[in-house]
Amino acid sequence: MAPVWLFDLDNTLHNASHAIFPAIMANMNAYIARVLGDGTTPAGIDAVNAARTLYWKRYGATLLGLVKHHGVDAGHFLAETHEMDDLASMIRHEKGLGELLRRLPGRKVLLTNAPHRYSTMVLRHLGIQRHFAHHIAVESMRVHGQLRPKPSKLLLRKVMRHQRVTARRCILVEDTLANLRTAHALGMRTAWVTQYVKVGDAVATAHPAKRLTRPGWVDVKVQSVRHLPARLARLR
Ligand SMILES: [Mg+2]
């Protein structure tokens, strides 16, 4: 049976840390400052940082805390924070991604916590959209009416049901360790892409002792997705 590949987008298929994540972070801070402010004056950066960190730690995503505690509209937040003047010029990526995806046996699904509009633009720029049978963006990550982005187990189970596939046949390809850990706990194979992981990222700081050491729940650690074909045996 051919595997079903679940591919993350940001910092897996392109380098989002170069310019995109800093821009999103700035947009996010401005948004949170407005939400926490009194309607006229935005909140200060210390209050913004505290809220962002708290919600990220507690819910795995800042957005979920803003929705839960401040009545923020998820769609509005995602649109505002992913608004960039010239996205195309900010994207950095390797060559040969299309060829790599073509060579990997099995169906590929894009599974990104980013919004649909943004991820569609990035996919188009990378020229790889035709290689994906499905594109699951954060707006579609609802289970029983609740937003459940990665690393939600409810989400991954829903994806498996929709794809009509068992966990054993799924391979999650990601830069974020927390997402790989959940996938592994459900019985999926896991591939960790490390070239865009930066020391100091939320990803790395959540596991400081294990920074770039392969944890037990990671089957394959590769610098680039282009190294996946050589490691197929360990993922089957
Ligand atoms: Mg990522």
Image: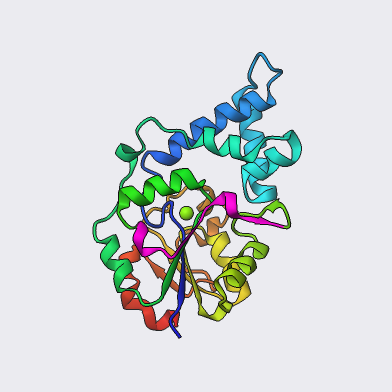
Q: Residue at x 63, y 66 (%)?
A: 158
> Toward the viewer: 123 or 68?
123
Residue 163, by quadrant, is bottom right
Nearest the viewer among 131 and 33 is 131
Question: Residues in magenta?
Answer: 129-143
Q: Position of residue 197 (x, y in %)?
A: 42, 53
Q: Residue furthest right?
A: 69
Residue 69 occupies quadrant: top right
Name the side, left or right, on which 112 lies relative to 90: right
Residue 109: in sight, yes or no?
Answer: yes
From what the image shows, is residue 55 above or below residue 166? Answer: above
For the point 38% across and 47% down, which residue is it? 122
166 lies above or below 94: below
**Residue 136 locus on image (x, y percent):** 52, 57
Farthest residue, direction top: 40
Residue 223 visible, this angle: no
* Quadrant housing residue 166: bottom right
**Would residue 38 be found to the left or right of residue 160 on screen?**
right
Name the quadrant of the C terminus: bottom left
Q: Is residue 12 above or below residue 232?
A: above
Residue 44: image location, x then y, percent: 62, 22
Is residue 137 shown in magenta?
A: yes
Q: Nearer the viewer, residue 150 or 159?
A: 159
Q: How is the image coloured?
A: rainbow
